[in-house]
Amino acid sequence: MGRLNALCFGEILFDRIEGKDHFGGAPANVAVHLSRLGARSYMLSSLGSDSLGDHAREILVREGVGTEYIGIDTLRPTGVVDVALGEGIPSYEVRENAAWDHIGTEQLSALSREHWDLLYCGTLAQRSEQSRATLSRLLQDLSYDHLFFDVNLRQSYYSAPVIGDTLKYTSILKLSDEELPLLSTMLMGEEQEGPQFFQELIGGYPLEMMILTRGAKGADFYFRSLPDEVYSVDAGQVPVVDTVGAGDSFSAAFLFYFLSGDRLYKAAEKAGLLADYVVSRTGALPEMNREIRTRLGLRTRE
């Protein structure tokens, strides 16, 4: 197949960690990783007409991410998240009424002329009525093969209706072991383990696959075609500097390699390699060195 064509919907923001601003937002992180790996990667979002917005656009352009579907909001600022690290585990305070809370449908016509191998979304960008309505239009009107839904629960910015509506279009769902009890209680009325939760989900939604990440314990993969089986991969033994963006790197690498034709175990192995690399360094998007590029099968830079 040709290059993977991917559209990531949602927040572009800066994580403010110990007084320093770090480019981020789960959709933006995934878009950058996909581009680095070789995909045609685009963001659909909104930035403020401010210095952080200019900086975000510069970063995306430098990383090869398409910015033509990013709006400029002259009334609201570029998003900022205050991140506190405790024992390397991040906690987040997401500032409200940011530019990405007001993603509009102006680009819908242009987006509709493309066929997308992959759409990516989460829950955070659906906290506002406008961005949620725009995503709903996309899911109904665009031509695409897969919707990857990373629930990525933050603070109180999620609800059963939002998650249920998104699941109606989802082919690949990702959640963490911390999110599983919250999500299963919200949707099924009780805490459930991964196998039971997946069985109930595929009874009501078009899921083909569910990925349950388990932090240092690795990840479990569930499939509609093999509903009674679980494929598990272990995490590598690496020193953890911080976990900001680790899940995003795992998602991007798995999606890139799996949808580009790798066998599942190979795609999962490469996803783990990139996630291990990210957690062993500061920030969500550390520059990939020669070793990790070689291990991922990418051309090394001179």
Image (cartoon, rainbow, N blue to C red):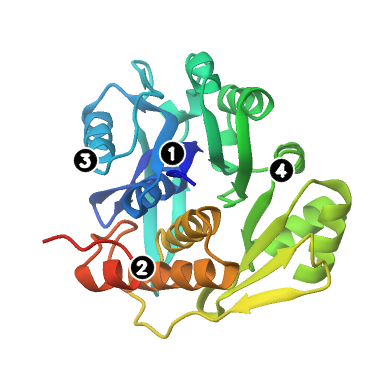
- Please name which of the two marks, 3 or 2, marks the residue nearer to the observer: 2
**Nearer the N terminus, badge 2 or badge 4?**
4
**Nearer the N terminus, badge 4 or badge 3?**
3
Q: Amino acid at mark 2?
A: Leu
Give the numbered dot on residue 213: none
Residue pictured at 66% horizontal, 27% vertical: 136
Give the numbered dot on residue 95: 1
Q: Horizontal and vertical percent for residue 24?
A: 36, 47
Residue pictured at 45% horizontal, 43% vertical: 2
Q: Residue at the front extreme?
A: 1
Alpha carbon distance from label 4 to label 1: 21 Å
Tag 2–tag 4 contact (CB < 8 Å): no
Decide: few, some or many residues near mark 3? Use Cα within 10 Å; few <14, some 14-19, many ≥20: few
Alpha carbon distance from label 3 to label 2: 21 Å
- Please name which of the two marks, 4 or 3, marks the residue nearer to the observer: 3
Decide: few, some or many residues near mark 4? Use Cα within 10 Å; few <14, some 14-19, many ≥20: some
**Above or below: residue 216 compared with residue 59:** below
Residue behind mark 3: 62
Residue behind mark 4: 163
Give the numbered dot on residue 296: 2
